[in-house]
Amino acid sequence: MIPKKFEDIDEKAVQSLIENSQPENKTLDYKKEIPLGTDDDKKEFLADIVSFSNTSGGDLVIGLAEKRDKEGKKTGQPEFFGLPEDLNEDFEIQRLSNVITSGIQPKVTQFKIRFIKWSNGKKVGIIRIDQSLSSPHMVTYKMRPAFFVRNSVGKQPLDVHEIQNAFLGNEHLTEKIRNFRTERIGKILANETPTRLSNSRCILLQLYPIKAVMNSIQLDIKKIENRTTPIQAMHTSSYNNRYNLEGWLSYSSGTESHSYLQVFRNGPIETVESSLLNEHEKIGYAIPYITVEGELIKSLDSFFKLL
């Protein structure tokens, strides 16, 4: 995969693949031209998309192809060919998208397509496919359904036992999220929170990043500590930060906190607020929905800035 945000990929980023003789691998594939000419081309293209979705995601670069030696064998080194200057980008994006969404089951939806103009006037296409939570996906376009995954040398089909394991693995991911949520709610109800809360009734917001679900990751907590814009818990103006066993904690100041934000080392983020519901109950009127909504939106925004 090209080590840049999708929107930031430019000629220089693609050129570096050529300069560094970057071969196709588990997260990278090349196509000399838009692969929609024949039914066989479309099947091959869909197999690539499915293999990325079922594994770790990746980039498909259109306009590059692996060089071949005198015997016609691939050398692993990419070569620039480019797409025509007068390419109708909107038309091709729509055409590629239609093939992807109609030729795969379950539908693959987590992909992006764009074209980059080269300095010589030609263009290069980039399709970024994210790892899917709905895997395993299969190619269904004019063929017997087939499942594919990727490894270091490219895509490969799955046999019956591997397909069964893929389905079981997907169920495990769902169960992993459910167990995390159940465990955390249980700890909050039992007052086993990272900092003592001032009230028992609270608002809970959790974010479990897909990458944390799919893979075992470890966040760099040091980067969170050194952020120029400090993180803080929901509905909090005065707060403290510290390390704890789970990762990084931000909590409202005072003898008892009314709010905290916990960043777990393996990816999930959780914030709990216990004053909003109780304050309005004491006053005798219902909490305005817009207040809760606004606090949730602000918390989500801070979550995404951490990722």
Image: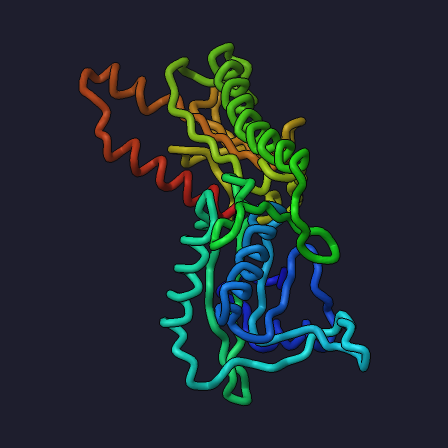
**Relative image position of residue 260 (x, y in whole percent):** 48, 28
* Residue 241 visible in rendering: no
**Relative image position of residue 145 (x, y in whole percent):** 53, 45
Q: Is residue 263 above or below residue 37?
A: above
Question: Image point 20% across, 21% down: which residue?
Answer: 286
Nearest the viewer among 38 and 301 is 38
Nearest the viewer among 129 and 237 is 129
* Residue 81 visible in rendering: yes
Please identify the quarter of the rendering in which residue 234 is found.
Answer: top left
Nearest the viewer among 90 and 243 is 90
Query: Which quadrant: the N terminus?
Result: bottom right
Question: Image point 47% across, 31% down: which residue?
Answer: 206
Please count the marks in the image: 0
Q: Residue furthest left?
A: 285
Question: Image point 54% across, 40% down: which residue?
Answer: 135
**Relative image position of residue 218 (x, y in whole percent):** 67, 39
Question: Image point 31% across, 21% down: which residue?
Answer: 277
Q: Residue furthest bottom?
A: 120
**Relative image position of residue 253 (x, y in whole percent):** 48, 28
Protein image colouring: rainbow
Nearest the viewer among 251 and 67 is 67
Please identify the quarter of the rendering in which residue 278 is found.
Answer: top left
